[in-house]
Amino acid sequence: MFQFDDQKLLSGYVTAFPGSALKPDQVAGAGRLMGFISTDPEISDIRWAAYMLATVKHECADTWTPISERGSSDYFRRYDADTPLGHRLGNTQDGDGFRFRGRGYVQITGRANYSRLGQLLGMGDQLVNNPDLALDPKVAYQIMSLGMRTGSFTGKKLSDYINQNACDYVNARRIINGLDQAEKIAGYASKIESDLTAARIG
């Protein structure tokens, strides 16, 4: 559980990322996300918080709010049930590629993931029956926190890379998506960690 000076946090962010003056909706989204992280009893390492925020900065294109993967229904047919990718994602019905497109702070994809994560969160079939729930900030945060802490996305988790003995922000990308954009996100995390540390109260 953390407490931060919001004004110092915002000022530090703008200094760390020149030209990134945030619009009111971005400020609101980032503030809401900080609220979730600050009150999450499972997040006790400020470096975990920094990496989570860096991930959202990248995955949600600086909107600081859960987003849907872009693309037409035609584009997402490559993930339908009758395709190798769709089969791997557990898609079983026509239209599942679009229906279970990426959503959230970390873009979960595929019927199997929506179903599995919903069950792990104690939501039963709610998430698979209503995939847009993954766009609700509270649900999106619960998905991200669970997946990044426990390895529910790729089998890799925060404590594998950020612990008492090490802080490997580059390889921590494996929690989400291999090493795609790993160096870039690691750079975000380092700056955000410094900002969080400077703005922390107590």
Image (tube, grey):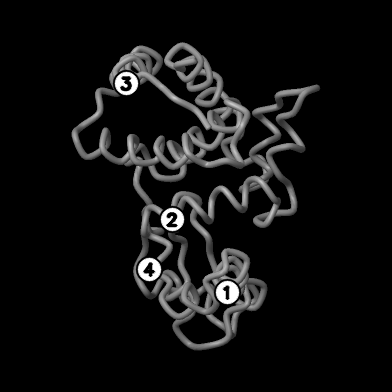
First of labels 4, 1 by sequence position: 1
Q: Dot 4 surroundings within 10 Å: few (below 14), some, or many (20 or more)?
A: some
- Give the distance between the C-alpha atoms of the residues marked 3 and 4, in whole angstroms: 30 Å
> Which amino acid type is shown beneath numbered disc 1?
Ser
> Which amino acid type is shown beneath numbered disc 3?
Leu
Residue 132's tag is 4
Please say if 150 is above or below 162.
below
Residue identifier under label 1: 115
> Which amino acid type is shown beneath numbered disc 2?
Gly
Residue identifier under label 2: 104
Q: Residue at x 48, y 75 (%)?
A: 97
Q: Residue at x 53, y 60 (%)?
A: 108
| Residue 29 x/y as whole percent | 31, 41
- Give the distance between the C-alpha atoms of the residues marked 1 and 3, in whole angstroms: 36 Å
Residue at the front extreme of this rendering: 202
Between 142 and 180, the one nearer to me in the picture: 142
Q: Dot 2 surroundings within 10 Å: few (below 14), some, or many (20 or more)?
A: many
Residue identifier under label 3: 10
| Residue 192 x/y as whole percent | 48, 22
Please say if 23 is above or below 187.
below
Between 138 and 54, the one nearer to me in the picture: 138
Between 187 and 85, the one nearer to me in the picture: 187
Q: Residue at x 55, y 75 (%)?
A: 111
Does dot 1 land on a helix, a strand or a loop?
Answer: helix
Q: Quadrant of residue 49?
A: top right
| Residue 71 x/y as whole percent | 37, 63
- Give the distance between the C-alpha atoms of the residues marked 2 and 3, in whole angstroms: 23 Å
Please say if 66 is above or below 168.
below
> Which amino acid type is shown beneath numbered disc 4?
Asp
Does dot 3 land on a helix, a strand or a loop?
Answer: helix
Residue at the bottom extreme of this rendering: 93
